[in-house]
Image (tube, rainbow, N blue to C red):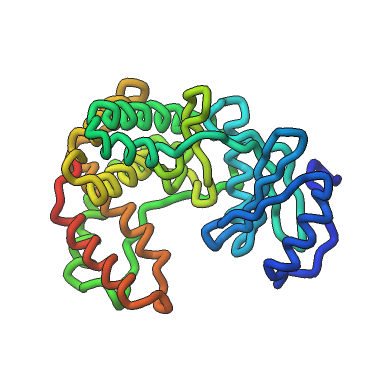
Amino acid sequence: MIGGVFLINGEGTETNVDTLNKLVRQQFSEYHISPLSGGGTNAVYVLERGGSRSVLKVAMVSNRNASVERECLRILEESRTVPRLFQNFILAERIGLHMEFISGKTLLEHIQENLEAANNGAIYDIFSSLGRLLAEIHSANIADCSQLRKIELEEPPSKPFIDNRLHKRSIELFSELSGTFARRASLLHGDFGYHNVIRDTSGNDRLIDWELAGIGDPRTDMANVLFWTHLHFPDIAHECGRRFVEAYLERREEECNPEIIHRFVIFQVWRIIEMVTDDFPAPVKSEWNRRLAWAINHDFY
């Protein structure tokens, strides 16, 4: 171990999944290992030993994203809002993170269960919890986090699958944000939402999957919640959003009028669109053009 980082001999950056699985089993031979889906960007394993479980994530696409997650877990290690990081190491030139296994259900699963039970009150309580959790995350000390990328307000790039009129309107909305953007920068999760929060068996909400994190305007994270909530749960979205924003503002002051929130939603939608490349399937590109058009004309708060 050098400087807290374990070095494991590997076979280069082109390591395939089978080779990686073999290396993981060699390094963690005392564990029972169960591979999980990592969403294409990570190889993820559940490690079991002596009745306890932990999680191993190994970067498959970007070591930078893995280093971002490692840094965020370090920043928040004193809180109970994220998994504990046990160790990090290099495996076949890829960053690996060995961390706490959070036993519980995601807040998305809780929302879906309460939708089936027609228990809207419980859903609204979940969104209040989301607001309180995000306010706590955004209050983290970021004085020593130079490794994290800055999420800045930049004119959205032209994309061949985005209608020119939508692109032009987006530029106008971005320009209206310039006077208020990131006056008070915070630690951003980058994909904050009910799908990335696990309510553990003690009732604590724990935020996972920090690969897209950075430093920027906190309303970017807020906008992500509102966008997906209005897209997936339109019948209850306004009340969910109101509970979420009010709970956040009870703990952390931020300018959040409907116009500003709308502009940040468009900003966040473009952050997603920028990850959609020309080699994506045509239906995916068409869908994001449709979603942008819908978002530009939608009231989120």
Taking 87 as reference, is 45 left or right? left
Q: How many marks are shown on the rendered structure?
A: 0
Taking 139 as reference, is 78 left or right? right
Residue furthest front as drawn: 117
Taking 40 as reference, is 252 left or right? left
The quadrant of the picture occupied by the C terminus is top left
Residue 186 x/y as whole percent: 45, 37
Q: Is residue 161 above or below residue 29?
A: below
Residue 56 x/y as whole percent: 67, 48
Q: Is residue 168 above or below residue 198?
A: below
Closest to the observer: 210 or 117?
117
Residue drawn at point x = 50 percent, y = 33 percent: 206
Residue 220 x/y as whole percent: 35, 45
Residue 264 visible (yes or no): no
Residue 280 visible (yes or no): yes
Closest to the observer: 209 or 21?
21
